[in-house]
Amino acid sequence: MAPVEHEWDAIPKRQGLYDPANESDACGVGAVVDMGRKESRKVVTDAGEMVIRMTHRGAKQANEGDGDGVGIMLSIPDALYRSACSFDLPPAGEYGVGNIFMPRQEERRRDCVILIDRMATKFGLCVLGWRAPLPVNSSVLGPYASCTEPYIGQVFLADSSNQAKANNKDATFSPTRSFSPGREPSKRRTVHRSAEAADDIADDVKRLPLETRLFLARRAIALRARELFCCSLSSRTIVYKGQFKPDQLFDYYIDLRSSLCKAYLAIVHSRFSTNSFPSWTRAHPFRRLAHNGEINTLQGNRNQAKAREAIMQAAKGFGSLNLDTVFPIDEDIGSDSAMLDNVVELLAAAGNRDLAEVIMMVIPEAWQNAEDTMSSEKRNFYKYHSCLMEPWDGPALVAFTDGIQFGATLDRNGLRPGRFYMTKDNMLVLASEVGVVDVPTDEVMFKGRLRPGKMLLVDFREGRLVEDAELKMKYAQRLPYGQYLEGHALELAKQLPPPITDDVQLIEELM
């Protein structure tokens, strides 16, 4: 194989019959959710047991100790971080945190630290401090994962009004103890052609919501450097993942074994790298979703997303920021799921759409020729958005969250299993199969399965499960999509003359 770009992301470049653009994966996905947002240790431990019981849905390599990738996304375990950090944190929800994969070489890692600090400053943020290296147990890794293991640091960011706390941070909690803030980065880093467009950021952008600025800072970092990878950067959720087998996830990350690691939301994923290479970065969950299946329309979706970059200039959610700052949409992680996550994350951050509405856009129901079975409002919603976004067709089961909503959906083909239980103590357990979490029969209030094109949604603002029909009608009626189509859509079928059915007419037309 040809040389790889990073020792911790050992994916070959395009060569011969191999093209990383054709890679896809099929996996096991599940979630444990407290619909009332009550944090508990049980949510985390049940999720850990769930992913182990789905070991057969992932894959392991020729060496018994190496897996294709496992991960968990949690709501922020605030108590754990307050206990572990040697610097002060603002109140929960007022700081962002992310796990960062970085080079093992100190000089290259120093450049990453400087870049993160610089991009945070540009978006009105400050680095409060680091937990670096993040406590891990590398002895559990197999030989392949061990030789590609990154240096993992955990960075904490907040609004620049917290600069005083940032100035008092413990310098020993840095990814490199010899790091000097005044040192210029080396020339080693890669800068994207449009990345420097973000260097002059308007004041209104620096006043955007914290979650939006964390997204913009992470995107700016990703476009400037290929030597680091942000697993996530958010004030609501955090991702722990890597190239593991399911039983190695909690053994590797010491945080996940702490009694202080409590959450109201946990999404887990065990990866089966169908026709693809496993790596630390390709493990799920990504920043907004975890996916079981394949995106069989991927090349068309990717081409259309790239084509639309040329006509997308501004977004309500980004203020006066030029969208060149966040392009290209595709971060080139290399999997179909990662590309879908990039699109969903951008659409959710850029406007006033809820995450569930974004998922309806990209993974629609079978709405065409459904006049007798679907309301006109829903059909108008899907028809309108089909002019903006092509469907990402699977088979696919997608679990998604932004910390405000949690949901899961099947694409319209419906060829991936999704089973769920709702319990009397307001818990929701969802997985690719039953039996992954022990739930006493007398505690089960309702159980069911996802159906083609249907969505399961928990809205944490309301603290309840929202039925598919209710949630979709809510978004379908939010704007007059029927009027938009009537006034602006041009259907070619209506512009053509009636079809010729008579042979004489056909001959005359041909003559």
Image: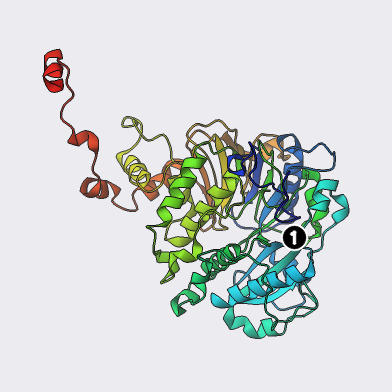
Residue 141, can we see it? yes
Which one is in front, 54 or 375? 54
| Left or right for 175, reference 397 | right
Q: Residue at x 46, y 41 (%)?
A: 300
Q: Residues within 10 Å of mark 1 (few under 14, many from 20)?
A: many
Task: Tell me if residue 370 comes above or below residue 456 in the rendering.
Answer: above
- Count the labels in the image: 1
The answer to whether residue 406 of the structure is visible from this angle is no
Q: Quadrant of residue 171?
A: bottom right
**In this picture, residue 44 sits left or right of residue 302:** right
Q: Amino acid at mark 1?
A: Cys
Q: Nearer the viewer, residue 127 or 500?
A: 500
> Residue at the spot x=80%, y=78% of the render?
178
Q: Residue furthest right?
A: 139
| Residue receiving disc 1 | 261
Per the image, label 1 sits on a secondary structure element best described as loop
Q: Locate the C terminus by quadrant.
A: top left
Residue 425 picture location, percent across and down: 64, 48
Q: Is residue 219 left or right of residue 365?
A: right
Q: Position of residue 278 (x, y in %)?
A: 71, 44
Residue 222, given in percent of the width and then of the height, sits at 60, 62
Q: Quadrant of the N terminus?
A: top right
User: What colour scheme governs how the chains and residues are painted in the rendered image of this protein?
Assistant: rainbow
Where residue 214 appears, as percent x and y from the top left, is 57, 67
- Pick the residue in front: 394 or 307: 307
